[in-house]
Amino acid sequence: MEGRATEEITTEEGVDGRLDELVEALQKTIESKVPEKKQSPYVKRWWSRELTDARRMVKRLGRDSWERRDLRGHPAHERYRRARNDYGQKIKDTKRAFWKAWLEEIDAKNVWDANNGKDMEEAAQRVVDMMGREGGGQEWADQHFSLYEVHKFACMGFSRRKEVDPGNPRKRRPATRPSISIGGQQTETKRTHKFLGVVLDQELRFHEQVAHAVGKGASWVSQLKRLAKTNGGMRNGFARQLYQAVVIPSMLYAADVWCTPDIKTKTGAVVKGSRGFITKLARVQRTAAIQILGGYRTTPNDTLDIHADLLPMATQIRKICARSAARIAALPPEHPIRGPAQKAAKLVKRHRAPLHYVMGTLGVDVRKKKVETIDVVRKPPDWECPVEVTIDGRKEEAMERERANEADVRVYTDGSGYKGKVGAAAVLYRGFRQPKVLRKLLGTEKEHTVFEGECVGQILGMELIRRELGIRAATVGTDNQAGMQALMNPGPGTGRYLVDQVIAGIEKITRTRGERQIRIYWTPAHEGIPGNERADREAKRAAEGKETRGIGIPGLAAPLPAPLQLTTCFVYYKVRTLDLRSLLLFQVEGEAPDGGHGQS
């Protein structure tokens, strides 16, 4: 517009044309210079007018259903249920259609992809193009008045490729890493760089990170030595607590990324992990253990670990990796790392990543089994248990309550671990009729716990009550106080999805069979109560594989194979008992001290 500002306009068409050019120039300037308004986090891109109308309909029908909540067979409840289900399905379909179309029409302004290069020069050039191209990083920064601190950029080329050394053709050296220039600022390629507390090297071998971790551990142990002197220092128990609370977390920060444990394949072969790294880290623990115990410097490492009640360093690394694998396996399917973790669950023969070793410590194939997830908030604050739950303070009171029980139907449930497997059972007594029994085999003790068996027994008990006709009241006796407390307290915890199924079974009984008074009370185990003893025997029969056919427990898709502390204790137990020096030590000293790793 600057070159045409002095041109004379003599016709009406010229005025209109000049006006259109001015409007167009203003629009381009606004689009390029004025930053866009940040989108509200409460606005969904995929939301539509149809969904708004559906939401209003669900709210209206919900109010109608609530007003008629005392009339259980009223058609308003069914209309509300159908509208609610249709509304949820419409949301899923709309989201899927929107994001599918968005991904098909996506352009370079929305996604920057540097990709990989065939060599270092091509990869570096793609990074430069990503910043300088149209719609790239530099243009975005100019439009949004955001300045890049290019002098703070770090450039690294990750590759293990080698090239011939020009000075000595017989040797090979790491491939040359080119420097990059962004905005006139030259950025040299680094060999190492600290990112999020982990020292990354150009070949991702983590030798520098291990040296950094050993240095941090040695520094903390030297401070510990000043506090835990033999004469006048703190007690060895306090020194051990300081070591576990300060030195271990600092030294082994992000150890599941740069240190891998030994894992076993399906054939029993051992795949070696970072044994050299573990040896260096064990030296730091040795120094700390000597200071904690005040022992001789020639004492063997395993003896020091046993008497100081410390996990061996290899077991400690395995414990960290197993905890990380458990957290990854419990992530929702939408999480970005869930897909790579499922692929890494299968151990490949070559080019193993640290994620392969981490998932290998879990002992379960997350591709085939659903891992239990624990919800932080399960019930609203005003939620109340739909049944009466009673836990007597003494066994005598519970026995007296059992003798005074005159309910129409009496149900006894139990779960049992027997011969390496977990089973559950429920027995229903009604007058002088033949007792009815339901049995369910959960699986092995490596995959399930007795608490889950107890909860499944309660689910089976609710199923027996639902099948009975013409009853007014029913009592459920169980010796599982933990499951009963979980019914009353809706807080988070393991196995709570089974507790939710118990509550769902109670609500199903109320919905399909009308109001029935159901009371759950504690019955002490092995106190001569016939129903309790019968339920225990039936649970053991279920563990032997004699389960009732046609009984399916929805969602029983196996949580973690066993508590991680139990796995750690088992590995530590094998280290202590199978090592030759440990056997000789026990012959001389007897049983070594044990502080209980499973409880710490």
Image: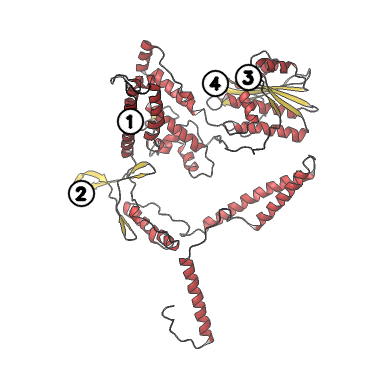
Q: Name the N-terminal-most of marks 1 and 3.
A: 1
Q: Which residue is mark 2?
A: 166
Cα distance between the residues tagged 1 and 2:
48 Å
Q: Is residue 482 left or right of residue 33?
A: right
Q: Up-down: is 78 above or below 234?
A: below
Q: Up-down: is 347 above or below 3?
A: above
Residues 424 and 409: in front is 409
Q: Which residue is mark 1?
A: 223
Mark 1 crowdedness (10 Å alpha carbons): few <14, some 14-19, many ≥20: few
User: For residue 420, which numbered disc appears in the image?
Assistant: 4
Q: Are marks 4 and 1 in contact (CB under 8 Å)?
A: no
Q: Residue at x 44, y 78 (%)?
A: 1
Q: Up-down: is 76 above or below 309?
A: below
Residues 197 and 453: in front is 197
> What's the amino acid at mark 2?
Pro
Q: Up-down: is 164 above or below 507?
A: below
Q: Which residue is mark 3?
A: 541
Q: Name the N-terminal-most of marks 1 and 2.
A: 2
Residues 405 and 317: in front is 405
